[in-house]
Amino acid sequence: MTVLILTSEEDVTADMVVARLHGTGTPVMRLDPADLPGKAVLSADFAHGDFDGHLSVNGHVLSMGGLRSIWVRRPGEPAAYAEHSSPWLTAETRQALYGMLHSAAARWMNHPRNADQARLKPWQLRVAHLSGFAVPPTVFTTSPRLAREFAEEYRDVVVKSASGPPPGDPGLALPTTLVGPGADFSAVAAGPALLQRYVPKRADIRLTSVGTRLFAARKTAEPGQVDGRYGDTGHAWEPVPVPERIGKSVHEYVTLAGLAFAAFDFAEDEDGIWWFLECNQGGQFGFVELETGQPISEEVALWLAQRRADRRSPESRR
Amino acid sequence: MRPFTLNYAFPRGLPNAVTPYHFDPARQLNVLPDGRPAVSDPDLLLAVGTTTSTAGSATHFDD
């Protein structure tokens, strides 16, 4: 039974898991949907009430009947590298590939349906609240008046992107940033703005959830630092225990969201409270493992290689 | 009009360094020039920054 990893070739974080799977003798196929059609080949035959399908790439062949699990890590757009790539070809290829995979009896980390929902920042905040996390007041708006009133009410507010920097412009950074006093909010009318009350923090917390295992890491923040992803604070990530209350909330969140993998970001304030900022359903974990030594890739590999669903762990299922 | 959020964007500059490893299709992971898996050298991976939370590909925003 084979583990299928959908990701790009340059994804060295996926390498960490591939190496673990090699070490345990677990069959694995690594496929970038961008290579389909072309380098990769797909075939799915519907007969006798079910699909009998195959995938092949780089000399590796996978039969749908032998598919154990699917890790949707950092896949490219289907057909992105095709000789005659187009939005239509991407849509056709997506139908063929994901339609076939959705028909297989495999475990997902994470199922695309759950992943799509879990990426929605407004939804995240509601689920976080329902799960018992502390969530800073937040507004999403295209109204300059409401944005201005929010800023006046909470004084120190940050602006952040809900979807990341504009795609196709890898040279552009869009960090979470404090909105200065007297800001002109008129441009809020040109696109939804995400404003949030600033949480003065003494540390960033990154908590990675894999099945039922939790790995928390902490990095001391500089005074006034807003976005821990940018700027060198001189501090390293260090492993920290997961408070019992936080652990329960994480379990509640991933169960509600149907996530087998999730990377949570918190801001730890001066009172030690972990404020929920966001949950990345496909978040990076390589840098945490490399700095802390936490065996996250090993846990991902173990989850993917499990023969049966662990009923205690949140499942990503159809 | 430029959306409000984009007023806080700035060019971060792309690294010029070429990653000192390449994908090995047979082994399905990236390897160093001497054949060792790139993941066998944690210090190198930390130095090139390809596992950090801002190292997402152009198609992904999951930090």
Image (tube, coloured by chain):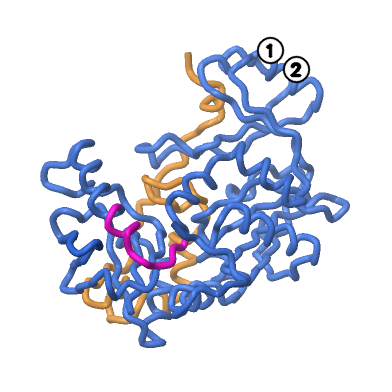
Chain colours: A blue, B orange
Q: Is residue A244 above or below residue A171?
A: below
Q: Is residue A100 magenta?
A: yes
Residue at point 23% right, 51% down? Answer: A96
Q: Nearer the viewer, residue A149 or A132?
A: A132
Image quarter in which the C terminus of chain A is found:
bottom left
Residue at point 43% right, 42% down? Answer: B13
The segment highlighted magenta reads: A99-109
Question: Which numbered circle lies on residue A149?
Answer: 2
Asked which secondary structure carries label 2, the reply is helix
- Residue A33: where, in percent of width, then height? 27, 55
**How crowded is the residue under tag 1: few (<14 C-alpha within 10 Å), some, or many (20+)?**
some
Amino acid found under the numbered disc labelled 1: Arg
Q: Is residue A172 magenta?
A: no
Asked which secondary structure carries label 1, the reply is helix
Mark 1 = which residue? A145
- Residue A166: where, in percent of width, then height? 43, 34
Q: Nearer the viewer, residue A91 or A33?
A: A91
Amino acid found under the numbered disc labelled 2: Glu
- Using the numbered discs, state the Cα–Cα distance from disc 1 to disc 2 in whole angstroms: 6 Å
